[in-house]
Image (cartoon, rainbow, N blue to C red):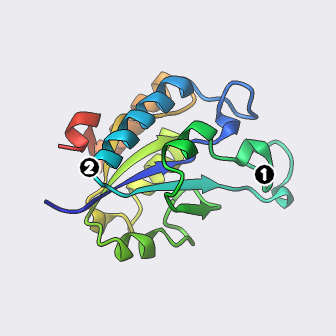
């Protein structure tokens, strides 16, 4: 079996109810991510957190600004894998100008399981990244969410049309 890694993208405070850009279904999605993370830990599958930052120079009206509470990874997600590496990014694609590819190579990963937020942006861009192709990316559907159910469904369809497999939590770790 190919060595897997679970990539948990951008489960950060600004996406929750009191944050700067709340998404649809974040609490449910976080619980599903915690479930997937627990399975990954039991099966000794590496977990990698991804954290997005936006420079204040980018202007007003955005979120995940450097050094803010909103940019912090949600405490429950960090507590579930406190020793997991954190990849810092400034682009939707988790591979773009980050150390993610190098980290996956060091871990001898052949398959990535993608989870996190936002389905139509960072999840899609990471799954479809040219750098991701060599890792046979799969998206754990229940572990993703975005602004609303329709946008979520459209993003999932767009990835599937381009060959990205959608998995249940159980199937992802089988």
Q: Position of residue 104 (x, y in %)?
A: 38, 69
User: Is residue 37 placed above or below 97 in the rendered structure?
Assistant: above
- Distance in Å between CA atoms under marks 1 and 2: 35 Å
The residue depicted at 76 percent of the width and 34 percent of the height is: 20
Look at the image and tell me whether residue 148 can be seen.
Answer: no
| Residues marked 1 and 2 touching at CB (< 8 Å) | no
Residue toward you, 70 or 164: 70
Which residue carries the number 2 mark?
Answer: 43
The residue depicted at 38 percent of the width and 56 percent of the height is: 128
User: Is residue 142 placed above or below 117 in the rendered structure?
Assistant: above
User: Is residue 154 placed above or below 41 in the rendered structure?
Assistant: above
Label 1 neighbour load within 10 Å: few <14, some 14-19, many 20+: many
Task: Locate the N terminus and report the quarter of the image it occupies.
Answer: bottom left
Residue toward you, 162 or 166: 166
Q: Position of residue 30 (x, y in %)?
A: 50, 32
Residue toward you, 5 or 82: 82
Label 2 neighbour load within 10 Å: few <14, some 14-19, many 20+: few
Residue 124: assigned label? none
Report the side of 134 relative to 174 (left or right): right
Residue toward you, 158 or 58: 58
Report the side of 40 relative to 147 (left or right): left
User: Can you tell which quarter of the image residue 23 is in?
Assistant: top right
Task: Locate the C terminus and report the quarter of the image it occupies.
Answer: top left
Is tag 1's residue or tag 2's residue first in the polypeptide sequence? Answer: 2
Look at the image and tell me whether residue 6 can be seen.
Answer: yes
Which residue carries the number 1 mark?
Answer: 65
Q: Position of residue 157 (x, y in %)?
A: 34, 37
Report the side of 58 relative to 51 (left or right): right
């Amino acid at each position: 079996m190919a060595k897997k890694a679970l990539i948990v993208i951008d489960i950060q405070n600004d996406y929750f109810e009191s944050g700067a850009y709340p998404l649809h279904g974040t609490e449910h999605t976080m619980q599903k991510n915690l479930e997937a993370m627990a399975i990954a830990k039991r099966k000794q599958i590496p977990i990698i957190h991804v954290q997005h930052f936006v420079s204040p120079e980018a202007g007003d009206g955005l979120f995940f600004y450097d050094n803010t509470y909103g940019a912090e990874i949600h405490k429950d997600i960090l507590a579930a894998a406190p020793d997991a590496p954190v990849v810092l990014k400034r682009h939707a694609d988790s591979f773009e100008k980050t150390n993610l590819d190098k980290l996956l190579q060091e871990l001898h990963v052949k398959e990535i399981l993608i989870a996190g937020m936002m389905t139509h942006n960072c999840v899609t861009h990471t799954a479809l990244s040219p750098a991701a192709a060599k890792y046979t990316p799969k998206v754990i559907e229940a572990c993703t969410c975005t602004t609303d159910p329709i946008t979520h469904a459209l993003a999932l369809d767009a990835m599937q049309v381009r060959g990205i497999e959608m998995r249940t939590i159980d199937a992802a770790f089988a």
